[in-house]
Image (spheres, helix red, strand yellow):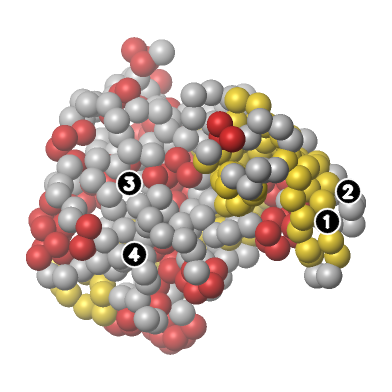
Amino acid sequence: MLNQYHIPQIDISDYDYELPDEKIAFTPAAERDESKLLVFQDGVIHDAKFSDIASFLSDQDMLVFNNSKVIRARLIVHNKTGARIEIFCLEPLAPSSEISTIFKENRAVTWKCFIGNARKWKEPLTFEVTVEGTQLTIHADHERLDENSFQVHFRWDNPSITFAEWLEAYGKIPLPPYIKRETNPSDNERYQTIYAALEGSVAAPTAGLHFNEKTFQALKEKGVQTAWTTLHVGAGTFKPISSDTIDQHQMHEEQIYVDSTLIKTLLAASDKRIIAVGTTVARSLESIFIAGAKLYLNDPDPFTIHQWEPYKNQENKKWIDEITKEEALEAILAYLEHNQLNQAMIKSSLIIMPGYRLKMSKSILTNFHQPKSTLLLLISAYIGDNWKEIYEHALSHQYRFLSYGDANLYL
């Protein structure tokens, strides 16, 4: 019930701006580090190249990256009459909802999906997939879940092939909905960070797309530390805010995997400036803090974080004001060690917006975001209304916007 919370009264129209189509990057830069970089530091805007990012950082900085890998979540299937049906896998439902385990399944899975041309899907579909020379028959049927989505049941006839293997062989990379073109072979590489490791995202953590081996070498030479978290990005990241005020918006839930290596690294670097590489890392780090704070307070459900949890009324939010990030991190580490676990999964629908008190990172590297989006609200939590001046500057200085666009660093 929203009356339990102190939600800032935010008018979404205050986070709108005009974004002409010609400012949107529909293709990536020729090289990853050739994109432009806007740096906002001490109230001053600097125009730079992304290849120069190390010059703005020092050995007192730590960059935290999201190593989630984009899956080939778009499946193009034809029914018996030849009608094209597009299935977009959003999140797993069965036999497990955990992304880390669903890809290992070798007989059947059920996913929540969007379906394009669903009215033409009147009977079960069958399609063939070849995985490293082995032919596989996939059977699919569906049931409506709600107004916009379906649950789709996939089963196949060869238990030596996992879901991950046939999806990789058959599926297509899911480009953002505003990039209205078919994927091409270069997207398979460029809509993926070079350090992507763990499958599960249906959208790229795009701030990381600018990094190449040269960038990492320059950061290493400068003494900048790096660390890794995993947040599997859901399609909800593109969901616009359709209500007039933020309290009516429903955030999507995402899965975050936190391991003991990350926690120990963050504890050892507690005196460094933590820079989130992308909004997904910002949400991941803050969710980790909240989970740790809930553990510290013996909360019975520490690894589920609801949208409005940080905005509880004053008497209920002791963890925001009194628990340090070190206490929260140590609580997670103690939990992992006590339970002999290497990692824990957090289910988080956290919304970060003006009024949220950032605990883990005070700086962020990100791309330019869509008008009236939760991502723009998150940026405002870092830099307040300065985003308006920054975006006006970017629009008038030939910066490219959105997923394949240029980067901005807020220090």
Name the residue that disc number 2 marks: 157
Q: Is residue 51 left or right of residue 257?
A: left
CB atoms of marks 1 and 2 within 8 Å: yes
Q: Is residue 41 left or right of residue 331?
A: left
Element under label 3? helix
Measure how far apart labels 1 and 2 are at the Cα level.
Answer: 7 Å
Of the image marks 3 and 1, the number of the one nearer the N terminus: 1
Measure how far apart labels 3 and 1 are at the Cα level.
Answer: 40 Å
User: Residue 393 at what x, y percent from top left?
Assistant: 11, 63
Of the image marks 2 and 3, the number of the one nearer the N terminus: 2
Measure how far apart labels 4 and 3 are at the Cα level.
Answer: 19 Å
Residue at 58% x, 47% y is: 84
Disc 4 marks a residue whose amino acid type is Phe
Residue 192 in sight? yes
Nearer to us: label 2 or label 3? 2
Residue at 18% x, 56% y is: 20
Nearer to us: label 1 or label 4? 1
Residue at 40% x, 77% y is: 32
User: Can you tell which quarter of the image residue 1 is in?
Assistant: top left
User: Residue 45 at what x, y percent from top left?
Assistant: 13, 67
CB atoms of marks 4 and 3 within 8 Å: no
Of the image marks 1 and 4, the number of the one nearer the N terminus: 4
Give me the disc on residue 136: 1
Q: Nearer the viewer, residue 189 or 114?
A: 114
Element under label 2? loop
Q: Is residue 237 left or right of residue 153?
A: left
